[in-house]
Amino acid sequence: MINSKTRTRINLDLLTEVKEDLERLQQQTRAASIVEVIRRAYSLYRVVAQHYQNGGKLIFRHADGSEETVRLVEFEGINNSGKK
């Protein structure tokens, strides 16, 4: 069966420490590959961007119950159309 979605191959030029971090994340999350880690990160980034676009905030709740609003400057000023 042929996948109906077109795929594009990309090459990344990463610092060694970034590759090592990705490998650690792969082990910690039991991802099948570094590519899977990157796909998951993309999915999360996309959800956060959509949330910001709809006027939401990103808030972390710590183990002690305290909350911290996370500022992501790349999303500041995004309006409902997704444009800055």
Image: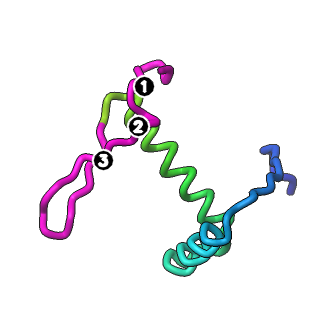
> Residue 69 location in percent, x, y?
24, 46
Residue in the foreground of this view, choosing between 22 and 30: 22
Q: Is residue 7 magenta?
A: no
Relative to 74, residue 81 above or below: above
Q: Amino acid at mark 2?
A: Val
Residue in the foreground of this view, choosing between 59 and 18: 18
Residue position for label 3:
70
Q: Amino acid at mark 1?
A: Ile
Identify the mark nearer the N-term, 1 or 2: 2
Q: Is residue 63 magenta?
A: yes
Residue position for label 1:
78
Q: Amino acid at mark 3?
A: Val
Asked whether the residues under the numbered discs 3 and 2 touch, taking CB atoms below 8 Å apart as contact, a structural biologist would say no
Image quadrant where residue 77 sits:
top left
Identify the mark nearer the N-term, 3 or 1: 3
Q: Residues within 10 Å of mark 3 (few under 14, many from 20)?
A: few
Question: If the image is split into quadrants, where does the N terminus sit?
Answer: bottom right
Q: Nearer the viewer, mark 1 or mark 2?
A: 2
Rendering colour mode: rainbow
Residue position for label 2:
73
Asked whether the residues under the numbered discs 1 and 2 touch, taking CB atoms below 8 Å apart as contact, a structural biologist would say no
Left/right placement of residue 47 relative to residue 64 reads: right
> Residue 59 location in percent, x, y?
26, 49
| Secondary structure state at the residue bearing disc 3 | strand
> Residue 5 location in percent, x, y?
78, 44
